[in-house]
Amino acid sequence: KVEEREERKRHLVVIQNEIGDFRSVIDWIDKERVNKDDKYNGDGKYNEYQICYNPSPFKAIDDLGFWKKIDLLIMNEIESVDLLKLVNGGGDNGYGDKKLGVKEYEEIGDLLIGYINNRSDSLSCLIITLGPIGSIIYYKKDGERRRMFMESIEIKKENVVDSTGAGDTFFGSVVSQL
């Protein structure tokens, strides 16, 4: 596996909204990652730089061009609903005040993938975390878009001291395995 990773020579840029002027940082990375000969690699992607983005805390960015610069997008259930509201013109999320389950979050993920990728495959991976329930993962394999649900591992509540940073830890763990 180490040889495979070295062969891919990808550089993952991990960014969250806590970074000051994160949009300028993402714009700069996107501009700088174009191959010297301005050609795409065979897989339709730019060269080895990939932007891994967690929009936390969520900021309304109503610019499809911005979202198309992201290669891996990981967000929690609240952020996914906030982005869906933005996609729907800032109005209703389509679900009202109804408590959402895995099925509804899968629908939201399908809509977000469709919005961001509209006629392109800019977003290679979308992960929506659902806290103690699990995560919905959208990815591409053998040229085909796939979706899977991964249950969380149950942890006894008496062993949890503080969940602060759990999402950041999950994000770092996912990116470290790419």
Image: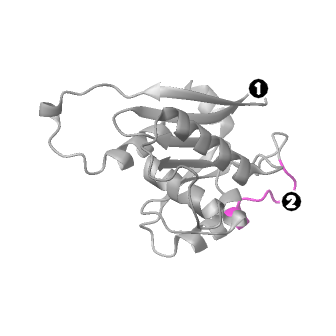
Residue at 58 percent of width and 65 percent of height:
91
Amino acid type at image mark 2: Asp
User: With respect to residue 141, does 109 lie above or below?
Assistant: below
Residue 104: % across, % down:
54, 39
Count residues near mark 2 (Cα–Cα under 10 Å), then give few for <14, some for 14-19, many for 20+: few
Mark carried by residue 111: none
Residue at 52 percent of width and 47 percent of height:
74
Count residues near mark 1 (Cα–Cα under 10 Å), then give few for <14, some for 14-19, many for 20+: few
Which residue corresponds to mark 2?
Answer: 38
Q: Is residue 128 visible?
A: yes
Quadrant for the C terminus in the image: top right
Amino acid type at image mark 1: Asp
Magenta segment's dominant SS is: loop
Residue 6 relative to residue 36: left or right = left
Dividing the picture into quadrants, the one containing residue 23 is bottom right
Quadrant for the N terminus in the image: top right
Q: Nearer the viewer, residue 70 or 42?
A: 70
Magenta residues, as a range?
Answer: 30-40
The stretch drawn in magenta includes residue 32: yes
The stretch drawn in magenta includes residue 73: no
Q: Is residue 54 visible?
A: no
